[in-house]
Image (cartoon, rainbow, N blue to C red):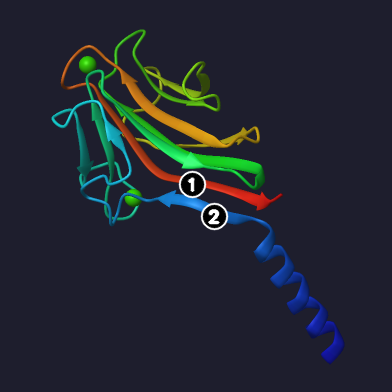
Amino acid sequence: MKKIIMVLFALVFAMSIYSLTIVEDKFDDNTSLTGWKRSSTTNTASYTGTPKVGDACLQLKYNANVITYVKLTGFKNIVLTYKMAKNSLETGEKVVCEYSTNGGSTWTTAASLLNTAANNTFTSYTTNIANCTVLQLRFKIVGSATDDYAYIDDVKITGDLQ
Ligand SMILES: [Ca+2]
Ligand SMILES: [Ca+2]
């Protein structure tokens, strides 16, 4: 019995060191949005209303975006997870997560949340990212008015050591 418990502990330890959290932002303790390059200070904000997960989320308005850069040298099996919600979007308007692994030369759409989705309701997404040296990650709203809203929360990148 003791041996089995030892083996179980070893397994749990091995699994826990395999997938590492490289970066995570729940926006709860980041009210100044440190680490995010903002297209506009008036149309990007820490938001404590509805919806949010935990204490706060990131709110984007109108046509704003935020970008972060993450160094991924030495990692493989890179997985990006995040949540997106919207409010007051009309036909053709959307919330988009996109990324670049080549310094911004080309961008890949990871996910789009369309106007037809329910308002103020988070959808969870998972995106596999190819091995790269630096990941540029961008969240944007394609809206047409300052009362068009996107909400982002629980952004996390995990990976294994190469
Ligand atoms: Ca949060
Ligand atoms: Ca609207």
Count neighbours of disc 2 (C-alpha within 10 A) and say few if under 14, some if 14 to 19, many if 20 or more.
some
Q: What SS does tag 2 mark? A: strand
Q: Is residue 1 visible?
A: no
Identified by mark 1, the residue type is: Lys
Q: Spot the residue most to the top.
A: 92
At a point 31% along the width and 49% down the height, the residue shown is: 27
At a point 71% along the width and 71% down the height, the residue shown is: 12
Q: Spot the residue most to the bottom.
A: 2
For the residues marked 1 and 2, what is the alpha-carbon distance in whole angstroms?
A: 7 Å
Q: Spot the residue most to the left.
A: 42
Q: Which mark is residue 17?
A: none
The image quadrant of residue 65 is top left
Please say if 147 is above or below 85: above
* Residue in the foreground of this view, choosing between 140 and 70: 70
At a point 23% along the width and 21% down the height, the residue shown is: 148
Write down the residue under mark 1.
Answer: 156
Position in image of residue 115 (x %, y %):
36, 17
Count neighbours of disc 1 (C-alpha within 10 A) and say few if under 14, some if 14 to 19, many if 20 or more.
some
Q: Quadrant of the N terminus?
A: bottom right
Of callouts 1 and 2, which one flags the residue occurring earlier in the amino acid sequence? Answer: 2
Write down the residue under mark 2.
Answer: 21
Position in image of residue 68 (x %, y %):
39, 36
Please give left or right for residue 95 compared with residue 147 in the image. Answer: right
Position in image of residue 101 (x %, y %):
55, 28
Please say if 2 is above or below 138: below
Position in image of residue 107 (x %, y %):
50, 19
Please say if 140 is above or below 155: above
Q: Is residue 46 visible?
A: yes
Identified by mark 2, the residue type is: Thr
The answer to whether mark 1 and mark 2 are in CB contact below 8 A is yes
Q: What SS does tag 1 mark? A: strand
